Image: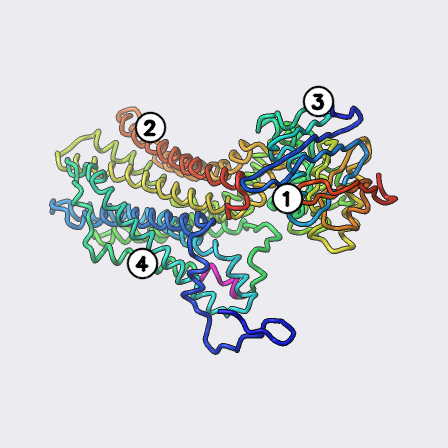
Amino acid sequence: MNFHDPAALLSASRLTVSYPGTRALDGVDLTVRAGESVAIMGPSGSGKTTLLHALAGIITPTSGEVIVTTEAGLVTVSALSESDRSRLRREDFGFVFQQGLLIPELTVIENASLPLLLAGQSRATAEAHAVAWLARLGLAGLERRRIGELSGGQAQRVAIARAQVTGARLIFADEPTGALDSATSRETMTALLEAATDGGRALVVVTHDEQVAARCSRIVRLRDGRLDGAERAGSEEAA
Amino acid sequence: MTATTTTTGIPARPARSRRGAPIARLTWMLARPGADSLSTLLLPGVAFAVTTALLLTVAGGGAMFWRWPDEEWAATYQLLSGLALALLVIPLASLSGAAARLSARRRDDRLATLRLLGATGRAVVAITVLESALIASAGAVIGVVLYLAATPLVGLIPFGGAPIGAAAILLSPLWVAAIVVAIVLLAAVSAVVGLRKVVISPLGVRLKQSAPRVSWLRMLVGAVVVIVAFVTLQSFGVLPSYTAIAVAIAAAFAIGVGVLNLVGPWVIWLIARVQLSRAGTAQKLIAARTMLEAPKVAWRQVSGLAMTSFVAVVGGTGVSFLIKEGGPADQVVLFSDVRTGIIITLVASFLMVACSVGVNQASAVLDRRDLYVGLDRVGMPRGVLEAARARGIMVPLAWVSLGSAALGALLVFPLAGYALITAPASLLVIALAFAVGIALVSLALVATRPVVTRVLEHPERAQ
């Protein structure tokens, strides 16, 4: 574990993911510090989503290590069992996907409070926290709506609230604006950056969109599973 | 064959064809076995096989009583078997409908794409009907084999004081062929009905914005129908003949089924509302919302048990009492047979509901694979996912079956109490049948777990 930067929320070292006949990731090193927003870019098939999944413990790398800083201390993600990785994702990470992947039968507030219910909180406590996050994301008054009654941008903000409600310090986003028009995409990205990088949090976002990446504090590019050249700093909006 | 190219190097546009879409070829392209065969072929095929096997067994059992050797009681046996068959019509229709809908729905997305590419509505319907009919035919043939394989086991059931024997429930080849044709026709008709949305609007296949509402007027109309039917039946006075009794029983049954189907979805909706307000865990919340999303679907899946459970308790109590009272030997045999028939009908209903649940749940998991994968990735424990699925089925099942049974027991309360004291073994057997039935449905749910596992492990393949 000696490669883990004490100031980092996440450190990945020599991360390799191989499938029969192909190597999706090839010796990737990455460090994510508190307050950072890191965009992972690259052409289709370059290993962006595989990297995100390996960092977040969704898949186990073939070799290499991922270490995260949690409230309980340093945790080597790749050494955890399936159920422990599931708990880590539930309690210490937040996720935003392209389609939001919200439960359509549940209301806005029920979707947003779900992670706290899963963590064993009472429904009243979970919903109180969810209300606060929904209000912060501009969704006050929509708590009792169903997901089908929302616009694409509103649904993504519910997904952001769901990702934040447990107080997760690391947020992973996979093409969070991929299904949105450009104006809604800007609004959603603003909401995500504001919510995910203050208070010592950090955001790791996979994107095809240069404009989205430019708003992050750092951009890393992948090509054929390897980091492609030097990292580039993002725009003035970097957290 | 290579396409000719223009001077700019762009492949030349092929000459316009006046022929219609090659239906048989397109059907094969869409249906041929591939990575997604599980959902598109295997699942509906299995569902049709089970439906056919159960339908043939039930029809064979019913037909047996029309060849009943004891002339004195033949009419009674025929009436009671007719009643049992009527009780099994609803769960059987529910199961066959589930199989047909599954077969049709699995094609929605690709057929919608075909529509967008310019296929005519007629071509889309033709492809669907052909494919559904082919899958149903294959399933039905396997079902016939299952039916034949099961007859020795079913033949062990005692009626008339001895096991009936495998030959007793064998239908003539003509009847078997007729039932197979009926299953295939049902599949074709359900496929057309299920496809209306794709044909009308290729983009409007899955857009669901608001939860359906179930009006309390259902309860009111149900109550009015019961009162009117009760008064009308009373006015018939003493029924003069055997035929009149049969008509009265049939009318009471039809009214009962009608009222249940009117009131049932509202009751499920009400139960779900109460469960939602009390839900303190993720699984309870999701299960309650799932029931609220489609109370009619939840009701349809378990409705066959309502009437069966009611009849099982009322009838079971009655015959238990009569057996205990004793009488001529042939009457005691008849009452024992009635009790056997009640238990078989109850277990068969549960079996059909279990199959229906298995088919519907496997289909639902495949339809919602993106959501399930997403929830798994955000760390929702597998146990919560399974518990939510189970509650969404078992809560309506328990309320409908045990609720109907309790209502039946209430109606014959003094008799039920007496039978419980004097003939506890008889009632215990019926209680055991309920336990076995509920266990069968639980098993059907467990049997769909590998589908969830497959979806979570290989989200890209389980389509």
Q: Are marks 4 and 2 on the same chain?
A: yes
Q: Position of residue B368 (x, y in %)?
A: 54, 46
Q: Is residue B198 magenta?
A: yes
Which label was assigned to residue A1?
3
Q: CA distance from mark 4 to mark 3?
A: 68 Å
Q: CA distance from mark 2 to mark 1?
A: 51 Å
Q: For the point 20% across and 55% down, which residue is it?
A: B173
- Disc 3 residue type? Met
Q: Is residue B217 magenta?
A: no
Image quarter where the N terminus of chain A lies is top right
Reply above or below: B192 against A17: below
The residue indicated by pointer 4 is B182
**Is residue B84 found left or right of B283 in the rendered image?**
left
Q: Nearer the viewer, residue A106 or A61?
A: A61
Q: CA distance from mark 4 to mark 2?
A: 45 Å
The answer to whether residue A32 is visible is yes
The residue indicated by pointer 1 is A102
Q: Are marks 3 and 1 on the same chain?
A: yes
Reply above or below: B19 against B298: below
Q: Position of residue B300 (x, y in %)?
A: 44, 48
Reply above or below: B434 against B193: above
Residue range in magenta is B192-199
**Is residue B70 found left or right of B354 in the rendered image?**
left
Q: Are marks 3 and 1 in contact (CB under 8 Å)?
A: no
Task: Look at the image and name its color scheme.
Answer: rainbow
Q: Are marks 2 and 1 on the same chain?
A: no
Q: For the point 22% across and 38% down, which residue is it?
A: B153
